[in-house]
C-alpha cells in the first residue's frame, strides 16, 4: 500500500493512506464519501467536547495562527490518519513562517495541535483545485455530512462535518 500512496503523491503531489469514512447512516443513503470538505465547515471545525482535548479554537483560527494560505471558498481535502506522502515541491506551497510555527506548536505536544495538523495536512500540502474542477465537484455533490440533511457525524475520530458526498 505504501507504493500506492507514493504513486499518488508522485502524480498529484499528495497521497493519503486512509479512504474517507462515512457511518452506516451516511452509506445507507447511497452516498459515496470523498476526501473533500466544505470550506466553511472545515474552517469552523472544533474538536468535540467528548474528546477531552479542550481546544478553544477552530481549525480556521489554528491555521491562521500558523500563517497558512489557502484558496478562499475552495473545497478542502482532508487526510484522516497519520500516513501520507508528499512531493518535496509541495512543501513550498506554505511559507517558512508556517513551518517554523508548526514545529514550535507540535513540540509542545498538545493533543489539539496534533489533531488539527492531521486533519490539515492534505489542505496545506495539496495544490489548489482548478476552478472548473471545483465547480464540477460542487455541482455533483449530493450532500454534505452534517449540513441540514439529517446525517450527523457519528464518529468524531473518523468523520468531520462538511464531508462532500456524491
Image (cartoon, helix red, strand yellow):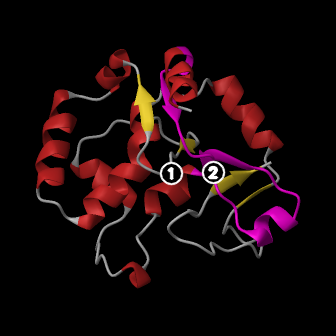
Label 2 secondary element: loop
Residue 87 screen position, x and y as percent = 40, 19
Q: Is residue 67 magenta?
A: no
Between 73 and 147, the residue placed more toward the observer is 147
Q: Which quarter of the image is occupied by the N terminus?
A: top right
Q: Residue at x 61, y 44 (%)?
A: 35
Tag 1 and tag 2, C-beta contact below 8 Å: yes
Query: Can you say whether 163 is above or below 70 in the image?
Result: below
**Label 2 neighbourhood size at 10 Å, few (<14), some (14-19), many (20+)?**
some
Q: Residue at x 87, y 65 (%)?
A: 29
Which residue is located at x 17 percent, y 28 percent? 96
Residue stretch rendered in magenta on the structure: 11-38
Is 52 or 162 nearer to us in this picture? 52
Q: Give the percent coordinates (x, y) of residue 28.
A: 86, 67
21 in magenta: yes
How far apart, in angstroms, are the residues tagged by discs 1 and 2? 7 Å
Q: Which mark is residue 20?
A: 2
User: In the figure, is residue 68 to the left or right of 102?
Assistant: right
Q: Earlier in the sequence, mark 1 or mark 2?
A: 2
Residue 9's label in the rendered image is none
Front-lying residue, 27 or 45: 27
Where in the figure is residue 13, as x and y percent of width and height? 48, 21
Question: Is 156 left, or right, of 63 in this rendering?
Answer: right
- Judge left or right: residue 19 versus residue 83: right
Label 1 Cα crowd, 10 Å radius (few <14 / some 14-19 / many 20+): many
Picture quadrant of residue 155: bottom right
Residue 23 lies in quadrant: bottom right
Labelled disc at residue 80? 1
Is 85 located above or below residue 19 in the figure? above
Amino acid at each position: 500500500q505504501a507504493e500506492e500512496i507514493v504513486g499518488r503523491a508522485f502524480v498529484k503531489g499528495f497521497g493519503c493512506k486512509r479512504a474517507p469514512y462515512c457511518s452506516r447512516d451516511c452509506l445507507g443513503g447511497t452516498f459515496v464519501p470523498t476526501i473533500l470538505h466544505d470550506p466553511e465547515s472545515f474552517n469552523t471545525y472544533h474538536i468535540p467536547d467528548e474528546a477531552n482535548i479542550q481546544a478553544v479554537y477552530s481549525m480556521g483560527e489554528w491555521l491562521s495562527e500558523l500563517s497558512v494560505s489557502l484558496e478562499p471558498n475552495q473545497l478542502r481535502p482532508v487526510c484522516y490518519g497519520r500516513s501520507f506522502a508528499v512531493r518535496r515541491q509541495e512543501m513550498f506551497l506554505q511559507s517558512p513562517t508556517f513551518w517554523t510555527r508548526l514545529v514550535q506548536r507540535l513540540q509542545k505536544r498538545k493533543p489539539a495541535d496534533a489533531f488539527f495538523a492531521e486533519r490539515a495536512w492534505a489542505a496545506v500540502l495539496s495544490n489548489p483545485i482548478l476552478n472548473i474542477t471545483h465547480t464540477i465537484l460542487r455541482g455533483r455533490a449530493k450532500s454534505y455530512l452534517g449540513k441540514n440533511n439529517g446525517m450527523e457525524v457519528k464518529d468524531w475520530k473518523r468523520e468531520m462535518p462538511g464531508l462532500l458526498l456524491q
